[in-house]
Image (cartoon, helix red, strand yellow):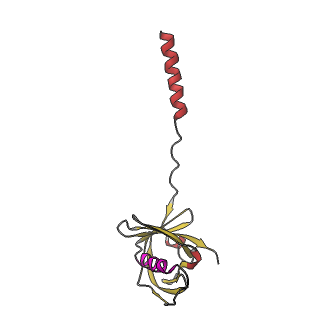
Amino acid sequence: MQKTTVILMTTLLFGMAGCATAPPAPPAPRFNAPDLVVDRLWGWERTETPVELFESPDPRRFTVRLSADGKAQVTFDCNRGGGSYQISTGKLNFSPLVATKMACTTENRPLDLHFSKQLQGAAGFFVENGKLFLELPMDGGTMRFSELKP
């Protein structure tokens, strides 16, 4: 009886050890230094909000470049524009942005309006795995950008 109990306990112990999973990988580090963002061309990939997902059909059609002089150059599908911005560690906000008013011939028209509104609502930023994330206020969502090479 005692031998059976020892065998049963040993089998149970090894069986449980085989089911153990590795601990989850630690999250990727986030960086929020302005020099990681400024003087680079960023293409918008998507915005996730608590209730919607907006995806860019082509990140090169929706871009932002923050110049060191505090000016933002923005591409809104077929329109161009910009304004000024302020940046500090982890914080980013834009002045009202202006843009040309060309009638885009693509199906992206609703996206350019969402992109503009979301960009102007940005309150913070971070860089993770080489991607730029702009945070919208009050848990309103996150915009994700990839760096574009000229």
- Of all residues shown, which one is farthest toward the right? 150
Q: Main secondary structure of the magenta part?
A: helix
Residue 40 picture location, percent across and down: 57, 76
Residue 101 picture location, percent across and down: 49, 90
Question: How many numbered markers are drawn?
Answer: 0
Q: Is residue 66 magenta?
A: no
- Magenta region, residue range: 108-120
In the image, residue 54 sits, relative to residue 74, either above or below, namely above
Q: Is residue 50 left or right of residue 14?
A: left
Between 65 and 102, the residue placed more toward the observer is 102
Q: Is residue 115 magenta?
A: yes
Between 29 and 110, the residue placed more toward the observer is 110
Q: Residue at x 58, y 71 (%)?
A: 147
Q: Residue at x 34, y 67 (%)?
A: 138
Q: Quadrant of residue 141?
A: bottom left
Residue 105 picture location, percent across and down: 55, 85
In the image, residue 140 sits, relative to residue 63, either above or below, namely above
Between 127 and 118, the residue placed more toward the observer is 118
Residue 78 picture location, percent across and down: 55, 85
